[in-house]
């Protein structure tokens, strides 16, 4: 099966894919599966592994024109415990019923603790996952180009809104509870990824191997929980071992639900940091597409938070502070002589002040209420008040 995946990559990826397959483009995979949630594995290089369950299914749905009707039927499938609608193709129904099951190692207690952690740390997590993760993703050439040339690249407000739907679902208090939506949105996102893997190699703008490999997904994963935890530690945010383990766990479960193999999902923060240090540096760098996407994203953020002349310089400075000089320069984020030092000097003070309040009664619920209001405002702004949901694409970005 690994050979079939490699052959598929070579056929679809052309010369660049061939060079990569021969190990001439980046270092060989060296992360040990013993550090994974599975504890063992074949150790196959995840750069040449995709989704062997979702990919042929979605390719078949696209080829036989079944996706529009599937999207229509799945539009009102919203809750984790909700039965699938009647009328879905049998192969799609069978896939979703299997894909929606939580892994056997999912720990309900840890998921509950993670939700409680989000009550008091939602401000940091929304900032780090939204702004920080967004700026990191545009500095990942394969991800930036995949976003830019797929259907979502033509309407970035809609694209960001749909990405936010999944991110907010993970951070919701009922993420994996029966009335939550994280299972639904993760499974829908897995189907979207499979569609992009089928469609994007057909685009004249795409060169290279099939997109969204297991390695690509790991790189993106590390721009979220691993980056966020590292920054919170850097800011000296008080986090207990139970909270830290729980936050990792909710993202481990999410990785599984998105189709990442258990043998690649880090079991501990030590393993996660080790894997991040291996996969992130060679995956990052500047692209024209990444700079364009960054400009759109920061423009949206400035309009959402503080309209007027102060908004964009402040957002530039905040983004540069979160991701650092090199990534910010790759993304083309302008330096702000006034705001850059102000943010760098003021943010640690604000964190210490905020953390001094956290132990007081009622502060976590109030903090969560404010953070949740901000989340809903962002989604409302991005969608212009219209209902937006994750759907399987049928085309690439129109020329």
Image (tube, rainbow, N blue to C red):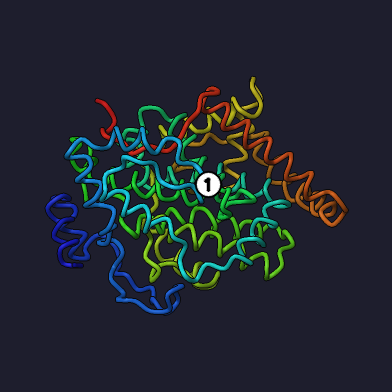
Query: Quick check: 363 left or right of 133?
Result: right
Single out the residue that lies furthest toward the top: 308
Residue 156 in picture, x, y percent from top left: 43, 30
Q: Count up the numbered dots.
A: 1
Q: Where does the C terminus fall, quadrant-wise?
A: top left
Single out the residue that lies furthest toward the right: 360
- Residue 321: name its quadrant: top right
Residue 379 in picture, x, y percent from top left: 56, 32
Query: Quick check: 95 left or right of 368?
Result: left
Q: Which residue is mark 1?
A: 181
Image point 47% across, 29% down: which residue?
157
Residue 72 in picture, x, y percent from top left: 36, 32
- Give the secondary structure at mark 1: loop
Query: Quick check: 354 left or right of 374?
Result: right
Nearer to the camera, 191 or 289: 191
Nearer to the camera, 343 or 278: 278
Q: Establish if 64 lies above or below 21.
A: above
Single out the residue that lies furthest toward the front: 86
Nearer to the camera, 271 or 338: 271
Residue 355 in picture, x, y percent from top left: 79, 54
Q: Where does the N terminus fall, quadrant-wise?
A: bottom left
Q: Establish if 190 lies above or below 5.
A: above
- Binning the other alpha carbons within 10 Å of mark 1 as few (below 14), some (14 to 19) or many (20 upward) gives many
Image point 50% across, 28% down: which residue?
387
Nearer to the camera, 343 or 103: 103
Image point 15% across, 49% down: which residue?
12
């Amino acid at each position: 099966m690994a050979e079939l995946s490699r052959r598929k990559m070579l056929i679809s990826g052309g010369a660049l894919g061939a060079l990569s397959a021969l190990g001439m483009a980046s270092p060989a995979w060296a992360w040990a599966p013993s550090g994974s949630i599975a504890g063992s594995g074949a150790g196959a290089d995840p750069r040449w592994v995709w989704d062997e369950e979702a990919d042929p299914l979605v390719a078949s749905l696209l080829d036989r024109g079944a996706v529009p009707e599937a999207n229509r039927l799945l539009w009102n499938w919203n809750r984790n415990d909700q039965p699938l609608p009647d009328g879905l193709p049998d192969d799609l129904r069978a896939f979703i019923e299997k894909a929606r099951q939580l892994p056997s190692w999912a720990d309900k207690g840890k998921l509950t603790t993670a939700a409680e952690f989000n009550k008091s740390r939602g401000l940091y997590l929304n900032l780090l996952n939204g702004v920080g993760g967004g700026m990191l993703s545009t500095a990942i050439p394969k991800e930036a180009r995949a976003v830019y040339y797929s259907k979502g690249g033509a309407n970035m407000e809609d694209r960001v809104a749909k990405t936010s739907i999944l991110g907010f679902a993970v951070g919701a208090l009922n993420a994996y509870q029966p009335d939550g939506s994280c299972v639904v949105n993760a499974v829908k996102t897995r189907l979207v990824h499979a569609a992009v893997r089928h469609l994007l190699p057909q685009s004249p703008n795409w060169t290279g191997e099939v997109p969204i490999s297991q390695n690509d997904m790991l790189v993106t994963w590390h721009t979220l929980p691993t980056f966020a935890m590292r920054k919170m530690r850097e800011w000296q945010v008080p986090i207990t071992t139970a909270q830290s383990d729980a936050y990792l766990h909710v993202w481990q479960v999410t990785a599984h639900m998105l189709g990442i193999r258990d043998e690649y999902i880090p079991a501990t923060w030590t393993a996660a940091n080790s894997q991040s240090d291996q996969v992130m540096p060679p995956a990052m760098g500047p692209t024209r597409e990444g700079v364009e996407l960054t400009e759109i994203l920061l423009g949206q953020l400035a309009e959402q938070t503080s309209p007027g002349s102060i908004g964009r310089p402040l957002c530039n400075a905040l983004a540069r502070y979160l991701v650092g000089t090199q990534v910010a320069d790759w993304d083309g984020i302008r330096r702000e002589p006034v705001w850059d030092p102000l943010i760098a000097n003021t943010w640690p003070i604000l964190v210490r002040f905020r953390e001094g309040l956290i132990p007081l009664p009622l502060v976590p619920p109030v903090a969560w209420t404010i953070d949740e209001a901000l989340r809903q405002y962002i989604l409302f702004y991005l969608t212009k008040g219209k209902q937006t949901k994750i759907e399987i694409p049928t085309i690439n970005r129109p020329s």
